[in-house]
């Protein structure tokens, strides 16, 4: 295929991405209700449209409604409505007010369509460097929502993506071509900052990658000179696109700072009290159905997020800048105080690129697995028929226990999940109604009935699965449960392995006594351990609260006294308890592995002059990892299903809203008597665990076992 045909096909594809993106965004623009801030930015557009119509160009020096954000995107909204008849200026409502019920239809439609064009151009632009990534961005529901409404993020995202793409295209170029791309990147970066400050974070990613590339090429001095000029050009572009700053930059910056301080500490932000990790909840879930029932033909953001996780390593190897771009944006989102969903558009473009790489690598792995299936079958050692017959009597007890303790409970949960079982129908259910409706529905003898409320069990089918999953997804529980598992088990592993290494050193006195002391937390039942820690942390009469009252606010742990008011501090409290409870098991696993290590390899490392860290990284850890990984998997299962810890804290403080899927399942039964929803959550939990364990097992190669013993 010659270059002309390839370029033509590429152009057709990018235009197709634009068409898909624009179609989805115009559909959303026509169906979404008016959201927060749309009245503000449409009013700002009205002001600039009036200035343009009256040729009052000096008015741009003084006009900047909602000065916490710069002018450029608002000016662009003004251009989108400048050809329409003027309407009375939209009322100036407080930033804490609820969304308005109506806006001028023609102005709203024109501004929303302009936003849709910006969002579609962003997807098309990304498709230039990653065709699949552009298509993913085109169908990302949160991106669709905030690029089909009167929001600043659509134009700001277009400018920041343009800055990233032009820098990306400059890599590998030389001479004038490279300079042109870098100049364009600086101008686009200034334009992104002139639209919404947060989107200029891409500039940090560009500088980091640029510096790393220059260091690899031994051109550090050249980098500092060029980067300085690039930064000056970007700053100049920012001021050019913001006439509001021209009269008195320092004074106007102070106005902006005060406005930003007001918006990030307003009552709505305080009341929401969203956790630090809230952006990840938005990124890992689609727009909730109860936000907008209409407006979206696809809700696949969670799948995109999973593929992004799978593709991050491959992206770092092939396109380091994109990975840095994503990491920088995520870091900015984490430290930024305001956690509204529209802010994640800072990161959705690089996320889509990385997700595309995840899809490609996963597809390649599946193709490789399929192509080598016959070879694996030949390499597998198959037992003879005689050996199989001899093994059957020994396998039967375990098989029977597996059927009774695993398969039957799972089948029972599935049966409950597709029938309507609650407190009113419980008697009928356990008098045969469960299996009657289950088999009748599965065999097609009973039609789904979700409306009957006659105290009987009824077959409802699998329709509740989607509703329950959407519900827990809107609460961010899948991400929180996974994050809780990863962070808590990682900390337990670090502390457990560290304690094992300390006890493994020569010359440690009372080794057995220390080991027994460390094991004690694991010997205490989790419910009792949770109650013990409640006595420490519980507000008003906990040990820390009493110490602060007795000693004063200078108590080292004073910041824990109001932990229940902050989700971040509450999460830290839970981690402390989980760390105390879980690290002994990891210590035992690590201690068992350390005892099996041959001393000869450490003697050889000492002769070669290896440091303590090098010895641990290249010798100790690889040798004990096959024994640590199964322990990590066991602890991960317990952490994912953590129940007593969360439930005890909830009993003390009903406003405590952190839950695992296990504690939510109990809550549905205990408070709502909804056995069907509880069963569905249990099945979803099992599926999540299976996927997480398979992925971790594949990454860690735990199936290879111990090869040194």
Image (spheres, grey):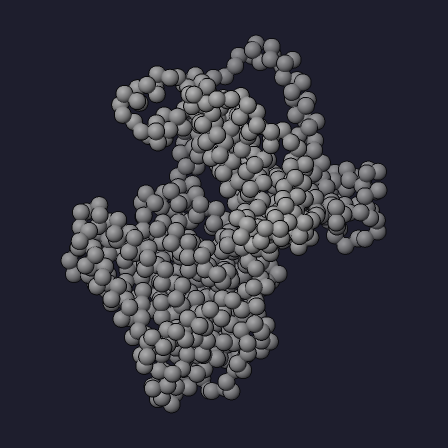
Query: Which of the 4 image quadrants contains residue 678?
Result: top right
Of residues 265 and 682, which is closer to you in this image? 265
Q: Nearer the viewer, residue 660 or 111?
A: 660
Where residue 318 sits, quadrant-wise, is top left
411 relative to 419, above or below: above
Q: Position of residue 271 (x, y in %)?
A: 59, 64
Instruction: Indicate left or right for 425 with 86 as reference.
Output: right
- 562 displayed left or right of 109: right
Q: Residue at x 48, y 61 (%)?
A: 337
Tell me which residue sits at (77%, 42%) in the image: 437
Image position, residue 315 (x, y; %): 35, 46
Q: Quadrant of the C terminus?
A: top left
Up-down: is 63 above or below 548? below
Give the answer, above or below, for where 699 lies relative to 678.
Answer: above
The residue under the point 41% across, 75% down is: 255
Look at 31% across and 64% down and name the residue there.
189
**Closest to the observer, 298 or 643:** 643
> From this viewpoint, which residue is outermost toward the bottom?
54
358, 650: nearer the viewer: 650
Q: How many labels were placed on the picture?
A: 0
Using residue 624 as the reference point, say whether residue 688 is left or right of it: right
Above or below, comparing residue 330 to residue 530 in the picture: below
Q: Position of residue 243 (x, y in %)?
A: 33, 79
Q: Left or right: 160 with respect to 336?
A: left
Q: Does the image show residue 270?
A: yes
Percent across and percent down for residue 615 are 34, 27
């Amino acid at each position: 295929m010659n270059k002309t045909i390839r370029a033509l096909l590429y152009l057709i594809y990018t235009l197709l991405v634009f068409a898909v993106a624009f179609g989805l965004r115009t559909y959303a623009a026509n169906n979404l209700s008016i959201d927060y801030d749309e009245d503000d930015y449409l009013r700002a557009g009205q002001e600039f449209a009036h200035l343009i119509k009256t040729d009052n160009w000096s008015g741009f020096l003084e006009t900047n409604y909602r000065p916490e954000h710069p002018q450029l995107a608002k000016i662009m909204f003004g251009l989108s409505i400048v050809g329409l008849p003027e309407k009375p200026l939209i009322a100036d409502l407080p930033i804490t007010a609820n969304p308005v019920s109506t806006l001028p239809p023609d102005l709203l439609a024109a501004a929303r369509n302009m936003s849709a064009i910006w969002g579609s151009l962003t997807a098309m632009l990304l498709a230039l460097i990653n065709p699949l990534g552009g298509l993913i961005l085109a169908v990302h529901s949160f991106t669709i929502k905030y690029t089909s409404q009167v929001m600043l993020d659509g134009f700001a995202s277009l400018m920041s993506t343009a800055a990233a793409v032009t820098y990306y295209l400059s890599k590998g170029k030389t001479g004038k071509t490279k300079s042109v791309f870098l100049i364009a990147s600086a101008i686009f970066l200034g334009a992104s900052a002139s639209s919404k400050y947060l989107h200029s974070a891409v500039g940090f990613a560009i500088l980091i990658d640029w510096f790393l590339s220059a260091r690899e090429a031994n051109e550090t001095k050249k980098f500092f000179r060029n980067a300085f000029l690039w930064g000056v050009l970007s700053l100049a572009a920012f001021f050019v696109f913001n006439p509001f700053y021209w009269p008195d930059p320092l004074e106007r910056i102070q106005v902006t700072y005060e406005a930003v301080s007001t918006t990030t500490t307003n009552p709505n932000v305080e009341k929401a009290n969203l956790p630090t990790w809230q952006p990840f909840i938005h990124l890992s879930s689609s727009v909730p159905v109860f936000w907008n029932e209409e407006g979206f033909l696809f809700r696949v953001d969670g799948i995109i997020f999973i593929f992004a996780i799978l593709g991050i390593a491959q992206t770092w190897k092939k396109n380091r800048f994109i990975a840095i771009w994503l990491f920088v944006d995520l870091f900015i989102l984490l430290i930024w105080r305001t956690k509204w969903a529209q802010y994640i558009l800072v990161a959705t473009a690089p996320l889509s690129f990385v997700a595309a790489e995840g899809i490609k690598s996963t597809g390649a792995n599946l193709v490789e697995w399929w192509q080598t299936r016959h070879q694996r079958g030949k390499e597998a050692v198959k037992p003879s028929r005689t050996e199989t017959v001899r093994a059957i009597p020994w396998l039967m007890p375990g098989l029977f226990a597996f059927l009774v303790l695993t398969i039957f409970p799972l089948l029972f949960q599935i049966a409950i999940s597709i029938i309507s079982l609650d407190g009113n129908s419980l008697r009928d259910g356990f008098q045969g109604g469960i299996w009657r409706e289950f088999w009748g529905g599965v065999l097609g003898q009973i039609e789904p009935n979700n409306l009957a409320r006659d105290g009987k069990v009824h077959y409802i089918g699998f329709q509740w699965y989607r509703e329950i999953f959407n519900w827990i997804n809107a609460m961010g529980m899948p991400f929180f449960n996974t994050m809780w598992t990863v962070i808590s088990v990682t900390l337990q592993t670090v502390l457990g392995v560290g304690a094992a290494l300390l006890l493994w050193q020569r010359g440690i006195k009372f080794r057995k006594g220390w080991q027994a002391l460390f094991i004690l937390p694991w010997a205490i039942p989790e419910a009792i351990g949770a109650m013990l820690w409640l006595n420490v942390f519980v507000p008003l009469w906990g040990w820390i609260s009493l110490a602060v009252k007795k000693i004063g606010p200078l108590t080292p742990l004073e910041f824990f006294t109001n932990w229940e008011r902050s989700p971040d501090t509450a999460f830290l409290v839970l981690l402390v308890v989980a760390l105390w409870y879980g690290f002994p098991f990891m210590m035992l696993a690590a201690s068992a592995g350390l005892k099996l290590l041959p001393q000869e390899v450490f003697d050889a490392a000492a002769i070669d002059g290896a440091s303590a860290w090098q010895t641990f990284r290249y010798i100790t850890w690889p040798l004990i990892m096959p024994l640590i990984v199964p322990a990590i998997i066991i602890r991960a299962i317990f952490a994912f299903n953590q129940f007593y810890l969360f439930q005890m804290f909830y009993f003390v403080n009903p406003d405590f809203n952190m839950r695992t899927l296990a504690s939510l399942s109990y809550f549905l039964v205990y408070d709502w008597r909804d056995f069907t929803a509880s069963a569905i959550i249990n099945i979803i939990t099992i599926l999540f665990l299976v996927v997480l364990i398979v992925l971790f097992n594949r990454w860690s190669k735990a199936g290879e076992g111990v090869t040194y013993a």
